Structures are given as structure tokens and as C-alpha cells.
Amino acid sequence: MKRILILLCSFLVLSAAVGCFKRPPVKLENSGSSVIVHVETLGEYPTTVRRVQISNATSGKVILELQAENGTPQIYNFRLSAGENSTRIADPEHGSYRVVEPSGKKTFTLEAGVRYRLSIWGNGWPSSEAEVKF
């Protein structure tokens, strides 16, 4: 009985540790002058996304940052386009996001020919990274 309890505890600790290092899935789909960012799990289930950040890949300047505000936001995908974009790019099934950057604005601009770094955090510590250019 003691052995079974030790094995069960070890399994629970290992499962929790692996979850802390899990990155959300990210797949980019080019669609004309825009990019659809897919974060679906197994291609059809929403994924928990706690933070989204878009920064200029050269300067590091943050263009957009969304952070989970209420609940556990789960999303399938969102679209980014060259030009003006709404800060409400992600429409979560559950929970909500608050706009950290650009503070107090409803839109942000992505320029053609500029490389951007997209970082997405799920439940774990590390982020998934992708590069976007229009």
C-alpha cells in the first residue's frame, strides 16, 4: 500500500511539473494581406491563452499585449493584418483579456515589411514564439 501511495504521489508531482513547461500550440496561416494565428489544441479544441504579446522583432518595442483578466480565456485563433487592427483580436469562449499595451487605445498598427515577434503563453511558464511579417 505504501508503494502505491508513493507511486501515485510521484505521478501527480511529475504531471504538474510537465504542465508547467507546456507551450500552447501555434500555427500561422497566411491569408492574403493577413495572418491567421491558430492556437487550437488537436486542431479543433480551444486552448487556454493567458497572455499574447506582439513586439517589433528588431527593436523589441511591444506593439500589443493582452493579459488574462477574468476566468481562464480559451481561444481558437485570431487574425492579424497589415495596417490597423483592433485590440480585441482575441474573442475568448471563457474569461476575458485586458489590454496592457497600447494602453487606453482600441487599435494598434502593424506595418508591411516589418518583422514582428509573436509570443503566446498558456498555463505553463514558457511561451510559444513565432515571427510574422506582412
Image: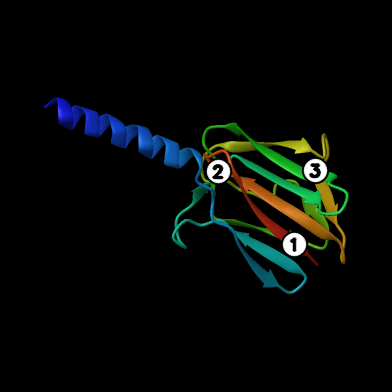
Q: In this view, does 111 lie above or below 54?
A: below
Which x, y percent locates residue 4? 16, 32
The residue depicted at 24 percent of the width and 33 percent of the height is 8
**Quarter of the rendering containing residue 68:** top right
Instruction: Give the answer, above or below, for where 95 lies relative to 53.
Output: above
Q: Which residue is drawn at 66% across and 36% down?
A: 67
Q: Report which quarter residue 65 is drawn in.
A: top right
Q: Considering only order in the chain, which callout, 2 or 1, is on the residue closer to the N terminus?
A: 2
- Front residue of 58/62: it is 58
Q: Where is residue 116 in the image (x, y as percent from the top left)?
A: 79, 56
Q: Nearer the viewer, residue 29 or 32?
A: 29
Give the residue at mark 2: 122
Q: Is mark 2 on a helix, strand or loop?
A: loop
Asked which secondary structure carries label 1, the reply is strand
Instruction: Name the residue carrying label 1.
Output: 132
Between the residue at mark 1 and the residue at mark 2, the CA separation in whole angstroms equals 19 Å
Q: Residue at x 74, y 67 (%)?
A: 34
Q: Foreground residue, 118 or 30? A: 118
Nearer the observer, disc 1 or disc 3? 1
**10 Å neighbourhood of mark 2: few (<14), some, or many (≥20)?**
many
Q: Where is residue 39 in the image (x, y as percent from the top left)?
A: 56, 56
Three-letter code for the amino acid on which mark 3 is drawn: Lys
Is 116 on the left or on the right of 120, as rendered? Answer: right
Q: What element carries label 3?
A: loop
For the residue carrying disc 1, how many other residues have a C-alpha within 10 Å: few (<14), some (14-19), or many (20+)? many
* Quarter of the image where the N terminus is located: top left
The label on residue 106 is 3
Q: In which quarter of the image is the C terminus?
A: bottom right
Please, which residue is most extreme toward the front here? 3
